[in-house]
Amino acid sequence: MAHQIELSLSGHQFAPPVSAQLTGMAGWAAVAESAAEQCLVIDTNLTIVAASPSCCTLLGMGDPNEIVGRPLLKVLRLIDFTANRNLLTDSDIDKIPPLLAVTSGRLARGLMRVDGAAEPGTDETVDGIATPLFHDTAVSGSLTFFAQIT
């Protein structure tokens, strides 16, 4: 025998948790700063807004508090996948997931090779998945999650 249940929430106000009340880039920054996953938030100027501690460890970026406000491309040394380990060209840099999500306004995914992630002279290959962040209808930045490729 089937039972029907009706639920009504009218007349009762629910307040979201304090963390859910943050909006825009401040909200995304708060999420990234406390995330266990390796994630990074940048704005449209490609400036780091926030990074999780595990992201900073994976990419060799140092203390999360010290990189906020710095340009992403001054913090990361991106290299190509050749044996020569050349710096990425400007046209290749434009294709890395955090930047591509900002410029295209769409999801972006790709591999990145970061020089000196573990220690100088070594590199780390990561898979990045980035989503654009919007304020109203305009892109305001991107949120990228990284996974180590072993």
Image (cartoon, grey):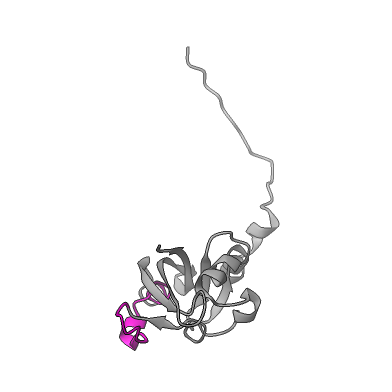
Residue visible at 51% across and 76% down in the picture: 42
The question of residue 96 being in magenta is answered with yes
Image quadrant in which the C terminus is located = bottom left
Residue 80 percent coordinates (x, y): 33, 80
Q: Position of residue 114 (x, y in %)?
A: 43, 77
Give coordinates of residue 20: x percent, y percent: 63, 57
User: Residue 22: which quarter of the image?
Assistant: bottom right
Residue 13 lies left or right of residue 31; in this view the side is right
Residue closer to the observer: 141 or 81: 81
Segment tinted magenta in the rendering: 81-102
What residue is shown at x 46% (from left), y 67% (from top)?
144
Residue 48 percent coordinates (x, y)? 54, 78
Residue at 45% across / 78% down in the picture?
122
Please say if 37 is above or below 103: above
Left or right, residue 112 beside residue 18: left
Relative to residue 127, is residue 44 depicted above or below? below
Q: Is residue 92 magenta?
A: yes
Residue displayed at 59% across by 31% down: 7
